[in-house]
Amino acid sequence: MDTINVKDKDAGATLAAGDELRMETVGLSVRYGTGNYGIRDVSMAVADKRVTALIGPSGCGKSTFLRSLNRMHDLAPDITVTGQAFLDGEDLYAPDMDAVLVRRRVGMVFQKPTPFPTKSIYENVCAGLRLVGVNKKATLDEAVERSLRGAALWDEVKDRLKTPGGSLSGGQQQRLCIARALAVEPEVLLMDEPTSSLDPNATIRIEQLIHELKEQVTIVIVTHNMHQAARVSDYTAFFYVGELVELSATKEMFLKPREKKTEEYLTGFFS
Amino acid sequence: MKLRTRFLRDRLMLAGLGLLTAVVVVPLFIIIFYVVANGFSALDANFFTQELGSPARAMQGKPTGLVASIVGTLLIDLAALAMALPFGIGTGVMMSEYREHPFAPIARLMVSTLNGMPAVLMGLTAYALVVKNTGGFSGMAGSVALAFVMVPIIARTTESVLTVTPWALREAGLSLGLPRWKVTLSLVLPAARTGIITGVLIAFARAAGEAAPLLLTSFGNNFLSFDLSKPMDSLPQRLYSLAISPYKQWHALGWGGAIILLLFVILTFFIGRVAVARLEKRMKG
């Protein structure tokens, strides 16, 4: 197991034996209209059905990188993405690749819980399914129960599925958002600081959930909290000023980081 | 500065603000009081059931009323609203959700210009487009003129309401693999609906009070008509013609009509408020 070298384009080689490559970026850069780089020349691997944590100080590009994995930058006209991002060998930025289809395969959960305010708990979970033409009640009922169970929310809400999503507590809302993302059965789930607005108990529930979810789905999580990265992830990537400094198995990185910058960050030399 | 001086200065500023506000509020009460005091006596059963007819009718003390104007106002305004809604909301959505589209900046410029344009020009335009081409004055031409008045107001409020709707809502929708039009229609517009309803009501109330665009289009009709293809009466335009008429009896009717117009606008806002409050309550559960 080697530290990734950004010049080394075969990022998949850094994964542990037995882990399969699911996503991979090659020389991925995101540039803002001002000419500044959000991330620069990032080549990185994401292992199948593992949790990969992205850590680093504020403004290091970890969220920018995450959002480039499901083409969330597309709507901002002054952001340009160059390089490649592969999902199962398909380039998500290929000219004939449809961003809507990419996002159906790569789901996302945001920092602030964002339940759809006008929809009930039930309708929140089905929102993605209804679009792909699933309208049969039995199928929807089943998907809602499966997703809410998957997000460890079913027992708390099964008797009030018709009430608005906004009536839940913050932690429940975030699990509702996870259920909503799971309902469309994504292959990869991106999580952008999913617990930063939650209290410690709700945070523990989400972290347990991440453990359970990685049985079925590949997870990439941005976290501001390196202890959280240590708790939940199999791999950790350390970003600094827009560049990927190091990608290692989490245990290795926390016990014996390869790069000096990583060590300084982990030991609290800067933050 | 001494504490006491600061305290006094604070009080002085507040008193100044109170005075300025009072000056703004007082005219509203003067208008309401004056209109009600002058027009209340005209409001009898005949007022709501009889046609205006010729001036002789009022002079001879025969029953006369403004039923034609009241019915005409409702028909013309509702038809105008039905026409203005899709265009106004559509333009607002274009300006807010598709900022990069080449139409968006053009629409923004046109909406600002139209918003400040005198309503009589909307009437002239509807005259040239509809009256000239259909061969005569009609309630429908009046509706088109009022729709011109409503569209920029609806578009502007829709844009500003959508702009303050959290961006996160759109991202959450997109991240589920929903296309943009679906995110706009099924997530963003419903989330902004209370604001949009308020904007539509403001546009409706504003247009309901316009006389100038109707003088050249729906023209007016002393007799009751339900046919939007014929000249039709409306309250603002009728108020104007009653006020400039030489008959005392008609002046009284005019004041009565002003009360109805005032009530109509107030009622519109009241219904809107209730609807918005109920929607908000349902959203919170």
Image (cartoon, rainbow, N blue to C red):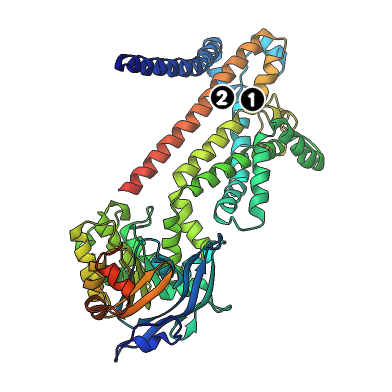
Q: Residue at x 24, y 68 (%)?
A: A267
State whether residue A14 appears in this view: yes
Within-10-Å neighbours for mark 1: few <14, some 14–19, many 20+: many
> Going by the image, does A126 lie left or right of B155?
left
> Picture coordinates of residue A4 (x, y %)?
37, 82
> Picture coordinates of residue B184 (x, y %)?
50, 57
Question: As shown in the figure, which amino acid type bears the numbered disc 1?
Answer: Pro
Give the residue pinned by disc 1: B236
Within-10-Å neighbours for mark 2: few <14, some 14–19, many 20+: many
Asked if disc 2 and disc 1 are in contact, CB closer than 8 Å, the reply is yes
Report how far apart the C-alphas of labels 2 and 1 lie in the structure.
8 Å
Is the residue at mark 2 from the same chain as the one at mark 1?
yes
Give the residue pinned by disc 2: B261
> Picture coordinates of residue A224 (x, y %)?
30, 63
Closest to the observer: B138 or B55? B138
State whether residue B60 appears in this view: no
